Amino acid sequence: MGNLKHLIKTRRSVRRFKKRPAPRKILLEVIEAGIRAPSGLNNQPWKFQIATEPGLKNLISGFTLDKYSKIIREAPALIMVYLDKQKIYDRDKDIMSAGACIENMLLFIHSKKLGAVWLGEILNRKKQLQNKMRNRKNLELAAVIALGYPDEKPKNPGRRKLSSFLLKC
Ligand SMILES: Cc1cc2nc3c(=O)[nH]c(=O)nc-3n(C[C@H](O)[C@H](O)[C@H](O)COP(=O)(O)O)c2cc1C
């Protein structure tokens, strides 16, 4: 448990990566960690696409702001997380389940001494992006995770104090 607390505290969003590829075995382990997350009715409403090929990463990078597209192009790997429309039973809960899955993946990535960032801005153009992808009819993009070996030590952006979140009853 001490180790988990440490991992939770020290995980940072990493946006600069070394060129060294992320081994496919680790990418599959990351997804394995993701699918262990809880989901409403255990419906597991997710699908994943691994993107490592430069042409594909370039295509994807064209659907977010310039400041984020560089991250997508330069990350050795992307894990595209989709909601599986055929599995959806309650949109709010399914999106929350996807969030739990993504956090599992981020913590696992950190535990393996890799780094990652959860990219959400790209969702503003998810329809346009998905129109360019094959076999994506029953899917809805939920997030893109860019990952690889870190080439930066990001500063801790900090959090507001615990007491600021607690409601007085
Ligand atoms: C739903 C969501 C969407 C995010 N979208 C982006 C994004 O589009 N680009 C980006 O650089 N970071 C994105 N982030 C990462 C946050 O900026 C980051 O988690 C936050 O600043 C706290 O930093 P930390 O992860 O290092 O603790 C996103 C995070 C979440 C949870």
Image (cartoon, grey):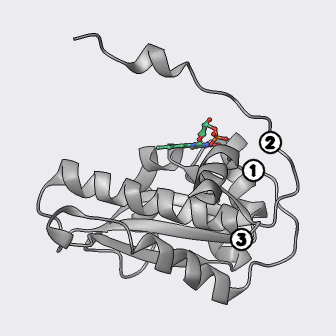
> Helix or strand or loop: what does disc 1 sit on?
loop
Mark 3 or mark 2, earlier in chain: 3
Image quarter hosting the C terminus: top left
Label 2 is placed on what type of residue? Pro
Disc 3 within 8 angstroms of ligand 1 (CB): no
Asked if residue 162 is positioned above or below residue 141 in the image, the reply reads above
Label 3 is placed on what type of residue? Lys
> Helix or strand or loop: what does disc 3 sit on?
loop
Q: Nearer the viewer, residue 57 or 117?
A: 117
> Quarter of the image holding residue 65?
top right
- Residue located at (73% from left, 51% from top): 14
Q: Horizontal placement of 139 versus 159: left or right?
A: left
> Quarter of the image holding residue 151?
bottom right
Spatial CA span between label 3 and label 2: 17 Å
- Residue located at (41% from left, 20% from top): 165
Q: Mark 3 points at which residue?
A: 112
Q: Mark 1 points at which residue?
A: 15
- Residue located at (66% from left, 87% from top): 24
> Quarter of the image holding residue 51?
bottom right
What x and y, as percent, mark residue 18? 88, 65
Asked if residue 4 is positioned above or below residue 66 in the image, the reply reads below
Disc 2 within 8 angstroms of ligand 1 (CB): yes
- Residue located at (55% from left, 70% from top): 79
Label 1 is placed on what type of residue? Arg
Q: Mark 2 points at which residue?
A: 154
| Callouts 1 and 3 close, C-beta under 8 Å | no
Disc 1 within 8 angstroms of ligand 1 (CB): yes
What x and y, as percent, mark residue 60? 58, 63
What x and y, as percent, mark residue 36? 39, 74
Q: Which of 150 and 63 is in front in this view?
A: 150
